[in-house]
Image (cartoon, rainbow, N blue to C red):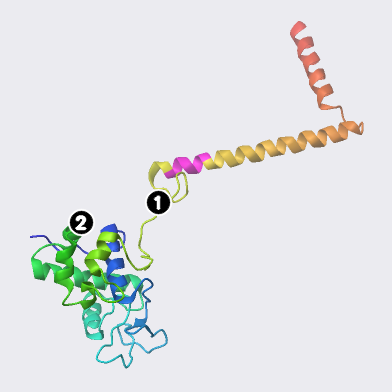
Amino acid sequence: MGGSVPYNPSDPTQQAFLSALAYGETGSNGGLMEGVGSADLSSAPVDQYGFPQWLGQGDSHAAGPFQFQPGTWDQLAAAYNLNFGSLSNQEQGAWTLASTTYQQKTGQSLEAALQAGDYNSVQTALASVWPSVTGGPGNPQGLAGDLASGTGAALGFPGAATVPAAGSAGTAGAGGIIGGIENFFVRFGLIAIGGIVVIVALWQLLANQGAVPSPGQTVKAAGEGIVALAGA
């Protein structure tokens, strides 16, 4: 028997699943405050868990990219301290509900089933919670087909990890420190070279006006002085 894997916003398996699930519920751009029937609930009053309060459509008051019913959401929110106004919180609620349901139905881990490509068992187990997973006019291939083809909604997944560029300030460990030192010396070197160029140019300008010896004359005089000292 597999255990339930907690929600991890950086887990690509979970991301792909949640995208596919949202696609079947609300299409390619499932809105954070989208009610059933594509209702815009962004201005609706909310309950203590951030869920929009509205008249619904028929007997459904579902909302969000995963189309939670208010009673279902409030139970999850109370248990895991979630707020409907946060996309990451909605993702956590959807994953938690899906993985718990799958484990109850099959005794196995949803994460393991997804990684093994056992999409049909996932679709079957979740149909009692999300009827859309079996497919419909807007998504005839259903959840199993969406997972197999990589079809999903553009949710954004704010917790996705990013890798900082090598040598950047965000790089962890010795590599970041060394990169920062390298950047310092590169920048310092460029500044020093620029300063030398300016000094030589100014010197040459003054030499052209006869105010000071030219750089060439100075170098020649210095060379003659060194020769004279050596012969002394």
First reached walking from the N terminus: tag 2 or tag 1 = 2
Q: Nearer the viewer, mark 2 or mark 1?
A: 2
**Is residue 211 depicted above or below 102 in this figure?**
above
Secondary structure mainly formed by the magenta segment: helix
Q: Badge 1, how many Cα within 10 Å: few under 14, some, many 20+?
A: few
Q: Nearer the viewer, residue 68 or 202?
A: 68
Residue 204 on image: x %, y %: 83, 32
Horizontal arrangement in the rendering, residue 231 relative to residue 120 (left or right): right
**Is residue 97 depicted above or below 184 in this figure?**
below
Give the residue number, with chain letter if any, for mark 2. 115
**Is residue 91 depicted above or below 162 in this figure?**
below
Residue at (77, 33) in percent of width and height? 200
Residue furthest right in the image: 210
Residue furthest top in the image: 231
Q: Quadrant of the C terminus?
A: top right
Q: Secondary structure at mark 1?
A: loop
**Is residue 185 depicted above or below 69 in this figure?**
above
Residue span colored magenta: 176-182
Horizontal arrangement in the rendering, residue 30 relative to residue 218 (left or right): left
Labels 2 and 1 touching (C-beta < 8 A): no
| Alpha carbon separation for disc pair 2 and 1 | 24 Å
Give the residue number, with chain letter if any, for mark 1. 163
Q: Secondary structure at mark 2?
A: helix
Q: Amino acid at mark 2?
A: Gln
Residue 216 in which image quadrant: top right
Residue 80 on image: x %, y %: 23, 74
- Say if the magenta span includes residue 179: yes
